[in-house]
Image (cartoon, coloured by chain):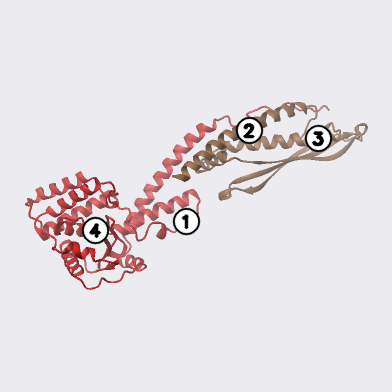
Chain colours: A red, B brown
Amino acid sequence: MHYSNRQPPEHINVTPVHPLRDLLVLGAGALALVAAVAVFAGVAGRLAAGWVPFSYEQQLARRFPAPPCPPSPLRHYLTGISEEVRVALRLPAHMPITARLHPDDTLNAFATLGGNVVLYRGLLQQLPHEDALFALIAHEYAHVLHRDPIRGLGGVAGAQLAMAALLGRQPVNVLDDAGLYTALNFSRDMERAADHAALTGLAGARAHVAGALDLFAQLAALREQDEPPAFFNTHPQDAERLQAARDFAAELGLPLGAPRPLPVDFQRWLGELETACAL
Amino acid sequence: MLDLIVGAILLCVAFVVGTQLERRHYRSLIEREQRLLHLPAIASRRPPADSLFQHHLVMGSTVVSVDYFKRFLATLRMLFGGNLTSYESLLDRARREALVRMKLAAQQLGATHVFNVKYETTSISKGRGNQIGSVEMLAYGTALVPHRAEP
């Protein structure tokens, strides 16, 4: 018997496909898949988190205690405004809010878990009058009322867990990486709803919405400076917010109104704030 | 962002270098396969049953590693399923290289045939996420050395 070998033919065991074409097709498909999973998981997480009882949120937030503010004119004044906002927004009794003052000059304010609202001195110093302060506090309190912090956290956690499962990585500590006590990422719809709630509360308390209009205008003016405040990053466009406030006033037939001024010593009180504290 | 840039650079470098190395290896393989065509490697288990030949175990092995580009492409493919085409050429080269080395070993013994040729594959190291890092391909068989051709 005669045995022989032939030169093995090429491209039998190797699929003749260009690797770059493969990369483009698979890469585009993977990006689309990841984006779809992230969006779906984010939405699902956001919806599911709304069912978490508020008491659980408060337990999470107990990790970050803040000392109470010492008795002072600033504390007394802001506590009064805060209570007025609570009544205007009809916040339920089981949803206590802790407003925290921070002496940092950051132009920011945010709502976070457990009914905590952080107000930075930098932004408070820029407010033109009391009604703008009312509108600012009402906007943040509305986020708490709408459970936006836990829903925002649920969205981030859902997306991160889905990515960990899809990409086969170790699950991340979502409670740390989601920024438990930093400005959580609210959607623009959440921001619009908070604006609307603030306008409603302001109209009920002051019979006009000049405070909100001036607040949005002031924040827009601050945005044009070299260092735009972080407060804006996830918010609707300024023009849209102003127009929504004007439409709201027109719909209810509200007058422009004369805003109530801030106390004469308000800036001095803010200057005397030395450490972060809770009202 | 830095991670993305570094990853993109690695992909480009791995693709260019890996493609060049692969083409060079295939050229070398084809040349050596043609030089060893006179020494058939046969999968049949039963060599000629006569006393004209001495039987020797011969083997050839190679360890190949997948480059960063191929591994990335395979990761994308594993999301959707289908042929891991990026690994096909790697394993094809490994098999052919192992076979060529086995034939070289047989040639050095003065063999005229290699029977009962088989392959074994072993994973040497795992990459990140338990993916293929490097693979050893072993080809072995029974070399038939004519009595008159003993070294």
Q: Which quarter of the image is occupied by the N terminus of chain A?
A: top right
Q: Secondary structure at mark 1?
A: loop
Tell me which residue sits at (47%, 49%) in the image.
Answer: A166
Residue at mark 4 shares a chain with residue at mark 2: no
Camera sees residue B80:
no
- Which label sits on residue A16? none
Q: Nearer the viewer, mark 3 or mark 4?
A: 4
Q: Which residue is mark 2?
A: B22
Q: Numbered disc 1: what chain?
A: A
Residue sitting nearer the eye, A157 or B67: B67
- Which label sits on residue B114? 3
Tell me which residue sits at (51%, 39%) in the image.
Answer: B9
Q: Quadrant of residue A62?
A: bottom left
Q: Earlier in the sequence, mark 2 or mark 3?
A: 2
Q: Secondary structure at mark 2?
A: helix
Q: Position of residue B79 (x, y in %)?
A: 50, 43
Residue at mark 1 shares a chain with residue at mark 2: no
Q: Nearer the viewer, mark 1 or mark 4?
A: 4
